[in-house]
Each structure stands twice: as structure tokens, then as C-alpha cells.
Image: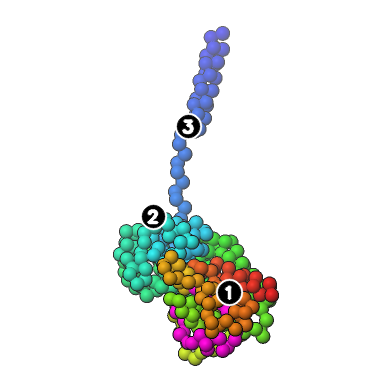
């Protein structure tokens, strides 16, 4: 009898130890796994880079990238907020340190956010050397469209590489696919016998934007295979276009006018601002031009001048396709 009690006690002890062990395994806090580290290798205008991902502090100064980064929910610690249109949420985010404009930059502010990744370009390209000195540990990415390369392919290259950097390859492909569709629509609807004029309105003036090289509007000629109504030798590439007479523009009698409203992005709230469409309608010199009489005027999205990324061109080409298809 005594031996049976001893055996029972021993069994209870073993069971208790087993339960205690199981309980301790359940209750003990799990050890945190070491942070996973990964790298990504990509190529930009300056060569090949390998970076640790995800980046801890991202700075962006290239206007062409703002909408893409925003759509991918990329958190910025600093950026060229002064150059951002109010259509971009970063412009209202108090947590994004403002680096100012390219003309009056506050580059020293980069130091306080200790970036490991800087998306630099467009207006801020000129400050690359100083930025590298202020943030020597950061990888500086330059994906500006390269001279001599087709602009549409450069827009897609920029988007694709950004997708690689931020692990957003599928999202990047979706953007480039939508862009390609907009181009295909516009090309299919356009009749090459119709002459096209590129224009830039700025400060109440109507200026000429050269096919191929003119700011914003110019690339549409090469991408869509448009027939220029007028070709001016030694034309400029700046944001104001060329100051040739409106009469000369009218004399070319374009069937379509494609317009960048520069002030729509930077001076729409100022007194005296006149939208591009109104300027063209009020112009007596252009009143008898085919494009004016038939309402064949397509103005680029209002924020184009400060938001020249792939989404802007996709919207513009779709708007042009809509207008062409409605005729």
C-alpha cells in the first residue's frame, strides 16, 4: 500500500513538472528576431549602387518623383516642399523638412534628418555636389531624363528604378503600363495630316514651345509622332518658351494647340492670373486659327510645371486622346 502511494506521488510530481515546463514555454516572452537586413542593387545616371533596405531616412528633391513616391506611401524626412504643388500631400505634411526652392535652397537642413537615401534631380541637380558633402553617408540617386534618350523611355526608366529601390516593382509596372496605354490611345486617334502647335502661357503671354525640345509640351511631338505646325530654328528649352509673334503662330494655322499653363502651377492665386484657355480665346490674332475655331485646344494638367512625372504625362495624353476621339 505504501509503495503504491509513493508511486502515485512520483507520478504526480512528474506531471507537475511537465505542466510547469509547458506553462513556462507559453508564458516566456519570445525572443525578438534580429532585424532582417537586405540590399538592393540598381543603376542610375551615375552608375551602379547597392543600398540597404528599407531606407531609414528618405529625402526627395526631384519634382518628377513626388507623385510616385506619394502614391507608394513612401515617408519623406525632407524634401523640396517649396517646389511641390498642393496636389501632393507632402506639401502639407509638417513632418517633412522643407529644403526650400532651387533658387533659395536650405540644404543645411539635410544634415538634421541624417538621410541614407536622397532622390535628387531636375531643378536641384545643380546642388548635387553640395548635397553629397552635407550627407556623405547617403546614396544620392539621379534619374533625370538623359540627353539624347527618348523622353518617354526615360520616364519609364525612372519609374522602374524607383520601383526597384522601394520594392514597388508591381506598382511601377502598373504606372508604366498606364502610360503606354495613354500613348497608344493618342497615337491611334491622331491624324498626321493635322498640324499641331505647342504653346506655353506665362505672365499673360502666349509663347512658342519647340517640338521635341520645348518645355513639357515639346516631348509630346516625338512621343506621339505629331506634325509640327511651325519649326523655329535655335528655339529655347526654358519654362517661358520662345517669344515669337502671335501672328506668326496664327500664320501657321495649327489644327491643334497643346498648351502648358506655367502660371497655373505657380501663380493661379495671384491677381491678374488668366488661365491659358482664356488667354487663347481672347487672342484676336488666333481667333481665325483652325484650332481655335474648332475648339481643338488641350491644356496640360494645372500642376504640370511643378509635377512633371509619369502620371502627369499619362493624364495629358489621355486628355488629348479624349479630344481627338470626340471629333
Q: Residue at x 39, y 57 (%)?
A: 96
Secondary element at tag 2? loop
Q: Position of residue 75 (x, y in %)?
A: 45, 56
Which disc, if any, is residue 94?
A: 2
Q: Position of residue 261 (x, y in %)?
A: 49, 73
Residue denoted by label 1: 298
User: Pointer 1: residues within 10 angstroms few (<14), some, or many (20+)?
Assistant: many
Q: Within the image, what quadrant is residue 320 found in? A: bottom right
Is 88 within the magenta? no
- Region in magenta: 240-261
Q: Within the image, what quadrant is residue 122 found in? A: bottom left
Real-space Cα distance between discs 2 and 3? Answer: 42 Å
Q: Position of residue 254 (x, y in %)?
A: 60, 84
Real-space Cα distance between discs 1 and 3? Answer: 67 Å
Horizontally, is 196 left or right of 30 in the view?
Answer: right
Is 258 within the magenta? yes
Q: Is residue 311 visible?
A: yes
Secondary element at tag 3? helix
Which disc, if any, is residue 221?
A: none
> Is 174 rendered above or below residue 21?
below
Amino acid at each position: 500500500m505504501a509503495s503504491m502511494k509513493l508511486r502515485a506521488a512520483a507520478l504526480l510530481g512528474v506531471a507537475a513538472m511537465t505542466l510547469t515546463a509547458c506553462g513556462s514555454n507559453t508564458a516566456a516572452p519570445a525572443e525578438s528576431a534580429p532585424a532582417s537586413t537586405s540590399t538592393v542593387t540598381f543603376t542610375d545616371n551615375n552608375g551602379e549602387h547597392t543600398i540597404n533596405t528599407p531606407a531609414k531616412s528618405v529625402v526627395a528633391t526631384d519634382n518628377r518623383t513626388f507623385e510616385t513616391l506619394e502614391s507608394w506611401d513612401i515617408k519623406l524626412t525632407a524634401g523640396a516642399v517649396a517646389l511641390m504643388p498642393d496636389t501632393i500631400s507632402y506639401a502639407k505634411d509638417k513632418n517633412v523638412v522643407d529644403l526650400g526652392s532651387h533658387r533659395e535652397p536650405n540644404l543645411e537642413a539635410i544634415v538634421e534628418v541624417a538621410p541614407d537615401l536622397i532622390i535628387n534631380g531636375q531643378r536641384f541637380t545643380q546642388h548635387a555636389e553640395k548635397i553629397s558633402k552635407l550627407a556623405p553617408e547617403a546614396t544620392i540617386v539621379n534619374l533625370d531624363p538623359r540627353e539624347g534618350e527618348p523622353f518617354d523611355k526615360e520616364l519609364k526608366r525612372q519609374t522602374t528604378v524607383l520601383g526597384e529601390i522601394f520594392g514597388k516593382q508591381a506598382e511601377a509596372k502598373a504606372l508604366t503600363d498606364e502610360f503606354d496605354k495613354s500613348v497608344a490611345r493618342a497615337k491611334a486617334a491622331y491624324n498626321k495630316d493635322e498640324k499641331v502647335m505647342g504653346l506655353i502661357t506665362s505672365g499673360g503671354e502666349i509663347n512658342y514651345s519647340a517640338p521635341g525640345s520645348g518645355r513639357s509640351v515639346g516631348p509630346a511631338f516625338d512621343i506621339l509622332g505629331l506634325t509640327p505646325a511651325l519649326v523655329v530654328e535655335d528655339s529655347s528649352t526654358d519654362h517661358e518658351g520662345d517669344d515669337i509673334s502671335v501672328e506668326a503662330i496664327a500664320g501657321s494655322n495649327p489644327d491643334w494647340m497643346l498648351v502648358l499653363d506655367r502660371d497655373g502651377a505657380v501663380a493661379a492665386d495671384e491677381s491678374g492670373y488668366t488661365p491659358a484657355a482664356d488667354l487663347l480665346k481672347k487672342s484676336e490674332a488666333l481667333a481665325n486659327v483652325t484650332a481655335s475655331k474648332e475648339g481643338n485646344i488641350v491644356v496640360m494638367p494645372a500642376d504640370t510645371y511643378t509635377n512633371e512625372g509619369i502620371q502627369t504625362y499619362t493624364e495629358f495624353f489621355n486628355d488629348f486622346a479624349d479630344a481627338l476621339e470626340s471629333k
